[in-house]
Image: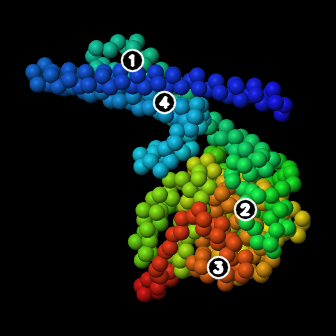
């Protein structure tokens, strides 16, 4: 793109700040509704104390208060969600009161939430009419019902359209993600002149620093899971249901062996487990800050469950995720190297902010495969996030990766949350219990 076009584009994009005063105006309107709420509440209390309020009046007055609160909620949604979507990101990462929906807010989600909020407000207004039906004309009741149904229909249409629109957005993102992956070196903190790379990896690392262009149409498949997955290796993104939500599309594309939720994790099973760490990781700040997570513990302590649970939540928050076991990643990277496209493969993976490497340590790797894993970790260092699960601490990774382990661990653990899980196998406990019965 030419310099004038770029300058014009930046200038047009900067005009979004013209909307900022509008949101501050809505904050002032929020103050007006606070005043209105307490004014209505004061009148209600006075009438109840003086005996001038009957049951119908109290019900109508309470509905007015509910109406004011719902409109205030609508204002907050527009102020926070609209500003975040159309003006600038709000830096709330790590704040204990950060709304869960704010992590994946966009104009599509915002429209659906606004429509459902309007339906709720309309329901309160219609209920007010029915409560005071003796003082409401049939004409008002009829049109109030018609308008309310129109709001419901419009909200249903918006919700229905949000699926295909989100799917289209995800496809566009996937289409442009590979081509734009090379531009992430500066922003993502990739290789630089000061990065230390062992001499035995210097040739391959140089290839990673200057990846060849990746066609935007190249899919990013993952080997089929040994225990089953949402997609077989023969399926592609185009085989998805075009009406499923964007989150479901991302979850299917991640190839999780099964669908797990963080909320389903049995926190009472591991003998040694930091629950506060899990709550913090569940906010997904580590993905935004390009940090890693390493789950270490014996088999059956829930490492894969936690990794999949975080991956599913990341998909729901709008991130692209890929899951595979260490053996499957080894096969993928080996195949790419044999085809002479290892650099392109690593660059294509940049379109996924989170990769999950499961079951590290169950199978030792030869020197060549260990070098491939080093290149994967080094390429994503300070650029994107990794979740790794393994049965032994990082200090013993030389048993798995040999001489490549120290340099790999250095980059993996530099910005990482190390979570240890101690205890007996959950699967064996269930099996023993069933046998005893």
For label 3, the crowd category at 10 Å Cα-Cα, with few meaning under 14, some 14 to 19 and many 20 or more, is: many
Q: Height in image: 64 above or below 359?
A: above
Q: Please, what secondary structure does the residue beneath circle 1 have?
A: helix
Q: Which residue is mark 4?
A: 79
Give the distance between the C-alpha atoms of the residues marked 2 and 4, in whole angstroms.
43 Å
The answer to whether 72 appears left or right of 386 in the picture is: left
Sequence order check: which comes first, mark 2 or mark 4? 4
* Label 1 sits on residue: 141
Instruction: Find the distance from the CA under tag 1 to the CA under tag 2.
Output: 72 Å
Of marks 1 and 2, which one's residue comes earlier in the chain?
A: 1
Q: CA distance from mark 1 to mark 3?
A: 73 Å
Q: Nearer the viewer, mark 4 or mark 3?
A: 3
Location of the N terminus (image quadrant): top right
78, 430: nearer the viewer: 78
Q: Earlier in the sequence, mark 1 or mark 4?
A: 4
Q: Nearer the viewer, mark 1 or mark 3?
A: 3
Which quadrant of the structure image shows residue 324?
bottom right
Instruction: Identify the mark at residue 397; answer none if there is no mark.
Output: 3
* Residue 364 rendering spot, x and y as whole percentages: 71, 82
Q: Secondary structure at mark 4?
A: helix
Tell me if I can see residue 178 in this picture. Answer: no
> Would you place residue 206 above or below residue 121 in this image?
below
- Judged left or right of residue 316, residue 437 is left
| Label 4 close to label 3 by CB (< 8 Å) | no
Q: Secondary structure at mark 2?
A: loop
Give the residue at mark 2: 195
Secondary-structure class at tag 3: loop
Front-most of 151 and 323?
Answer: 323
């Amino acid at each position: 793109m030419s310099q004038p076009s770029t300058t014009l584009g930046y200038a047009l994009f900067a005009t979004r700040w013209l909307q900022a005063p509008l949101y501050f105006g809505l904050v002032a309107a929020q103050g007006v509704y606070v005043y209105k709420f307490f004014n209505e509440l004061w009148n209600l209390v006075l009438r109840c104390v003086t005996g001038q309020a009957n049951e119908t009046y109290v019900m109508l007055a309470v509905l007015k208060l509910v109406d004011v609160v719902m409109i205030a909620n609508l204002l907050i949604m527009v102020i926070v969600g609209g500003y975040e979507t159309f003006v600038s990101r709000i830096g709330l990462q790590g704040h204990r009161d950060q709304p869960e929906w704010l992590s994946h807010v966009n104009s599509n989600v915002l429209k659906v939430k606004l429509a459902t909020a309007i339906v709720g407000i309309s329901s309160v207004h219609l209920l007010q009419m029915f409560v005071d039906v003796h003082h409401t004309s049939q004409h008002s009741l009829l049109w109030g019902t018609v308008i309310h149904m129109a709001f419901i229909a419009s909200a249903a249409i918006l919700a229905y359209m949000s699926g295909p629109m989100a799917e289209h957005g995800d496809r566009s993102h996937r289409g442009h993600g590979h081509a734009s992956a090379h531009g992430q070196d500066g922003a993502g903190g990739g290789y630089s002149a000061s990065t230390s790379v062992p001499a035995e990896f210097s040739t391959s690392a140089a290839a990673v620093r200057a990846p060849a262009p990746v066609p935007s149409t190249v899919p990013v498949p993952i080997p089929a899971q040994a225990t089953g997955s949402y997609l077989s290796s023969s399926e592609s993104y185009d085989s998805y249901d075009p009406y499923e939500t964007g989150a479901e599309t991302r979850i299917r594309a991640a190839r999780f062996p099964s669908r797990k939720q963080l909320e389903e994790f049995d926190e009472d099973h591991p003998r040694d487990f930091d629950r506060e760490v899990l709550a913090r990781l569940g906010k997904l700040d580590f993905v935004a800050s390009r940090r890693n997570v390493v789950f270490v513990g014996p088999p059956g302590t829930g490492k894969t469950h936690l990794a999949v649970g975080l991956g599913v939540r990341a998909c729901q928050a709008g991130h692209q995720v890929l899951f595979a076991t260490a053996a499957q990643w080894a096969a993928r990277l080996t195949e790419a190297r044999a085809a002479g496209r290892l650099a392109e493969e690593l660059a294509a993976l940049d379109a996924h902010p989170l990769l999950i490497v499961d079951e590290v340590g169950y199978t030792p790797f030869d020197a060549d495969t260990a070098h491939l894993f080093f290149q994967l970790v080094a390429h994503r260092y300070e650029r994107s996030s990794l979740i790794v699960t393994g049965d032994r601490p990082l200090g013993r990774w030389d048993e798995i990766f040999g001489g490549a382990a120290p340099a790999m661990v250095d980059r993996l653990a530099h910005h990482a949350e190390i979570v240890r899980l101690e205890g007996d196998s959950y699967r064996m406990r269930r099996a023993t219990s069933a046998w005893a019965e």
